[in-house]
Image: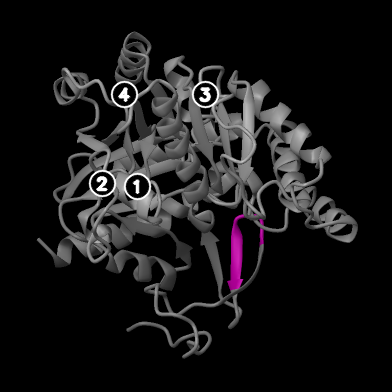
Amino acid sequence: MHAAPAAPSSPHVMNTYGRLPIALSHGKGCRVWDLNGKVYLDALAGIAVNTLGHGHPKLVPALQDQVARMMHCCNYYHVPDQERLAQMLVERSGLSNVFFCSTGLEANEAALKLARKFGHDKGIERPEIVVFEKAFHGRSIATLSATGNPKIQAGFGPLVEGFIRVPANDIEAIRKATESNPNVVAVFFETIQGEGGVNPMRAEYLQAVRALCDTRDWLLMIDEVQCGMGRTGKWFAHQWAGIQPDVMPLAKGLGSGVPIGAVVAGPKAANIFQPGNHGTTFGGNPLAMRAGVETIRIIEEDGLLENAARVGTHLQTRLLTALLHKPGVKEVRGQGLMIGIELDKPCGVITQRAADAGLLLSVTADSVIRLVPPLIMTAAEADEVAAILLPIIATFLSENP
């Protein structure tokens, strides 16, 4: 039996989400409370957004200070924290320049425009971009076209042309798909596919794609919207492979809950956009920039990269130990605090069952339980996640042999 709705659904809100019957009131650390006073352990973090959890004692006063000073001004003027945050991202990525926007979709849209302009600047009239099966880059018409999910594309054709789709972790597939094609300008993918089922790209594959892009004079564009900002234990997930992209979209965890997006570019792409080529009203606003600056500062002060790696390994080991070779469990995978548990059948009901038991998570790609908690999660809280989740999985599998 599902719980009664915590708050009535508004007849005036467009019906775009399949919501759980929960309305959240407030949070502290890795826990949140609904309007009825029920407490939940948050292993979703607003879908990898609430990097510092809820009500962080260092972040809250900084944002309160910024709200009192200025929340928004347009990009007709210099915004000092844009320079500060850009420098912080450049130093941690090894790249050179940053464009700020407000969402991951916008960041990916900007990356696609960069790739097309890169091609046009080389005299290519119809640039094409290599994208991946099971990818997710957003829901605008262009990012939806780059996404590899027919279900969410359905009803929105005609899609944008100019994409070549290949399977992940198969360098020969890229070579074959692009053979004798002079219009290819870029390869675009997530280091760890998020909505597609927490599917990591192998390190040797990332290195091979980087080498291929260098050989062919293509842009390597790596979407770190969900797996970046310390989630895997490094600032950006591709850094585990020792490579650098030419273009790197960011969003989600960069602002710890304040809407923010960014495109970080290396020398090959940093000067493609010129005044008038791209822009955004809200991108780079003072509140979002302060949130980004403070998020990076606190991650470093509190050792959260190391915490994500350590606690993520602890949680994944707990899950692997319990689920390895268990009938109905296909794989436990991921890195740091980005973990997917793939079952052999659709398991969307687990989202509600976990919430009923006081645990927030999601199911993605129909059959993958996704855990992306705040980077402040402790090993004890990770043990709580396992203690709540494992019996739910066991019960679900026993009901659906």
Q: Which of marks 1 and 3 is nearer the N terminus?
A: 1
With respect to residue 292, does 102 lie above or below? below
Mark 3 vs mark 2: in front: 3
Residue at 51%, 18% in the rendered image: 268
Q: Can residue 368 be seen in this view?
A: yes
In this view, which residue lies farthest toward the left?
401
Label 2 element class: loop
Quarter of the figure that contains the C terminus: bottom left
Q: Quadrant of the N terminus?
A: bottom left
Q: How far apart are marks 1 and 2 (CA)?
A: 6 Å
Instruction: Judge the density around disc 1: few (<14), some (14-19), many (≥20) Cα neighbours within 10 Å.
Output: many
Q: Are marks 1 and 2 in contact (CB under 8 Å)?
A: yes
Disc 2: which residue = 148
Does residue 209 sit above or below 17 in this rendering? above
Which residue matches tag 4? 202
User: Mark 1 falls on what kind of element?
Assistant: loop
The mark found on residue 269 in the picture is 3
Discs 1/3, front: 3
Which badge, 1 or 2, is on the more N-terminal residue? 1
Tag count in the figure?
4
Of circles 4 and 2, the one toward us is 2
Residue type (three-letter) at the residue carrying disc 3: Ala
Query: Residue 136 has which mark?
Result: 1
Task: State the image quarter where residue 355 is shown.
Answer: bottom left
Is residue 224 or residue 70 the one in the foreground?
70
- Looking at marks 3 and 2 on the same chain, the residue that comes earlier in the sequence is marked by 2
Residue 263 as seen in the image, left or right of residue 132 = right
Q: How is the image coloured?
A: one colour
